[in-house]
Image (cartoon, rainbow, N blue to C red):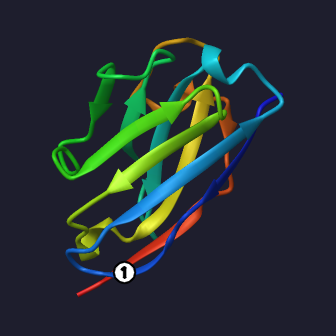
Amino acid sequence: QVQLVESGGGLVQAGGSLRLSCAASGGIFSAYGMGWFRQAPGKEREFVATISWTGGSDTYYADSVKGRFTISRDNAKNTLYLQMNTLKPEDTAVYLCAARNSPGGSWWYRDYPYWGQGTQVTVSS
């Protein structure tokens, strides 16, 4: 059973940056495809980015964050990251990391059986 714990959220002004982390334990992190999702109040859970077990350039992003966000992973540290630059008020949400029992990434939230509790990101205008 994989446990995921996110950190790094907070309050930032529009145009600023944040780096989220997701620490994994209880499983073989390097075997999992990983993803970041977000959920704003009253809205559906939304895909943000995904990365395969190899990391590197094997990534995929939602159009809304492409060019501003970067997903990465450090398998030696069992940690997933999301670097968020040029933040906008519409990026405000709870950000959740997720793991799937497959080495590839996925944009579909139902492909992920393991979820963290989330970290709040608030972007002020």
Residue at position x 42%, y 48% from top?
82
Residue at position x 51%, y 17% from top?
53
Q: Position of residue 42 (x, y in %)?
A: 45, 69
Q: Residue 4 falls in which quadrant of the image? A: top right
Note whether 29 is above or below 25 in the view shown.
Answer: above
Q: Is residue 45 visible?
A: no
Q: Is residue 97 visible?
A: yes
Residue extending farthest to the front is 76
Note whether 88 is above or below 68 in the view shown.
Answer: below
Disc 1 residue type?
Answer: Val
Residue at position x 27%, y 74% from top?
16
Q: Which residue is mark 1?
A: 12
Dividing the image into 4 quarters, which one contains the C terminus? Answer: bottom left
Q: Would residue 59 be found to the left or right of residue 21 on screen?
A: left
Q: Position of residue 54 (x, y in %)?
A: 46, 15
Q: Position of residue 31 (x, y in %)?
A: 63, 14
